[in-house]
């Protein structure tokens, strides 16, 4: 498997201190950090595309830089952010390219190659895309195909650089779920460089978190408990709530009220009021009580009136509270 020994990355000066890291078989590792912190440089160095300033990266005990291109392509596959150059290729053609390290220039796909492709199509649920041209695919479908091509290459290690960069929220979570499932099913070691913190926290087995010349390594939950995630991604206007596993805007309340209720109605009401600049305080004079109703909920302004929708409550709160609110 892939390991580093006192690996120093960068171009003229090191971006990070010497790194001793390890990818583990059957685990999804995420590499996170701000722009310019060294994620792409580390990924390129691990893939043998960029020479280290010092130290080494080993695959199966051999220095990555000592592998021939063909032999390295049998150990490690790489999915970059850039879209394919030739979008007129079909998905079938694209997947076939993943078998090139195992073929001589004059050979056609053998039965064993076609079996690998068929198995990967099933793993990635892309069977229905096989005869489509890349130009006709959505961004989410194209990213699944590029992951499938890496899997067809049949390497124990897969590296991906920002695989969700151009995807909407559902597709981002879908890609991370797919990658986690693939580690379980194929026992490959998968490393993803990404900015997507939320799906990373929910799916990763291990996290490499780069920040200001440091690299924090551990379980996502452990890095949350140690306060590392909050320190790295938080700032004066954004704070990480470890209880809710969410980042929240830091705001000074303009006014306060009591809020009682439970479940999703309480959570979403609290969120709506916070966005308006309303804080929650147990002894506040104004009291909003959330009560269940046949059609959902009722919001009662104790001693004043009731509201059948959250929108009408928010409108009234803004009118009845002091103008500074």
Image (cartoon, rainbow, N blue to C red):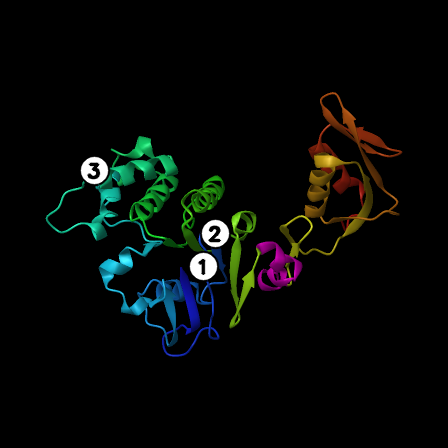
Q: Is residue 137 left or right of residue 9?
A: left
SS class of the residue under badge 3? Answer: helix
Marked residue nearer the N-terminal end (1 or 3): 1
Marked residue nearer the N-terminal end (3 or 2): 2
Q: Residue at x 46, y 40 (%)?
A: 174
Q: Which mark is residue 27?
A: 2
Q: Nearer the viewer, residue 184 or 130?
A: 184
Give residue 1's position: percent from left, percent from top: 40, 59
Up-down relation of residue 163 to residue 313 (above or below):
below
Q: Magenta segment, principal secondary structure?
A: helix
Up-down relation of residue 93 to residue 245 (above or below):
above
Instruction: Report if the CB atoms under discs 2 and 1 are less than 8 Å apart.
Output: yes
Residue 231 belongs to the span the image colors magenta: yes
Up-down relation of residue 239 to residue 45 (above or below):
above
Give residue 135's position: percent from left, percent from top: 27, 40
Q: Which residues are magenta?
A: 220-235
Outermost residue toward the top? 294
Give residue 170's position: percent from left, percent from top: 49, 39
SS class of the residue under badge 2? Answer: loop
SS class of the residue under badge 1? Answer: loop
Q: What distance separates the C-alpha of mark 2 from that of mark 1?
A: 8 Å
Q: Residues within 10 Å of mark 2 (few under 14, many from 20)?
A: many
Where is mark 3, residue-wise?
111
Q: Is residue 193 left or right of residue 271?
A: left
Where is mark 1, residue-wise?
23
């Amino acid at each position: 498997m892939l390991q580093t020994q006192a690996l120093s990355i960068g171009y003229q000066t090191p971006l990070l201190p010497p790194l001793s890291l390890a990818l583990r078989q059957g685990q999804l590792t995420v590499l996170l950090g701000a722009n310019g912190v060294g994620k792409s440089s580390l990924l390129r160095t691990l893939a043998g595309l960029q020479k280290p300033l010092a130290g080494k990266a080993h695959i199966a005990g051999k220095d990555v830089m000592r592998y021939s291109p063909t032999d390295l392509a049998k150990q490690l596959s790489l999915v970059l952010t850039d879209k394919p150059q030739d979008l007129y290729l079909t998905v079938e053609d694209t997947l076939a390219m993943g078998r090139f390290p195992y073929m001589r220039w004059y050979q056609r796909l053998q039965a064993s190659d076609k079996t690998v492709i068929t198995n990967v199509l099933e793993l990635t649920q892309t069977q229905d895309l096989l005869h489509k041209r890349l130009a006709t695919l959505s961004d989410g479908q194209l990213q699944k195909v590029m992951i499938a091509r890496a899997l067809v290459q049949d390497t124990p290690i897969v590296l991906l650089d920002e695989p969700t960069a151009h995807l909407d929220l559902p597709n981002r979570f879908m890609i991370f779920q797919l990658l986690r499932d693939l580690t379980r099913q194929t026992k490959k070691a998968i490393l993803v460089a990404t900015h997507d913190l939320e799906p990373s926290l929910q799916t990763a087995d291990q996290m490499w978190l780069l920040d200001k010349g440091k690299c924090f390594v551990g379980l996502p939950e452990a890095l949350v408990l140690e306060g590392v995630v909050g320190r790295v991604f938080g700032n004066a206007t954004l704070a990480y709530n470890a209880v809710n596993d969410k980042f929240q805007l830091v705001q000074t309340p303009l006014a306060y009220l009591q809020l009682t209720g439970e479940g999703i109605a309480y959570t979403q009401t609290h969120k709506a009021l916070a966005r308006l600049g309303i804080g929650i305080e147990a002894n506040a004079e104004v009291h909003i009580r959330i009560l269940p109703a046949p059609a959902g909920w009722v919001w009662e302004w104790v001693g004043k009136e009731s509201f059948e929708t959250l929108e009408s409550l928010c409108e009234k709160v803004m009118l009845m509270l002091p103008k500074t609110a």
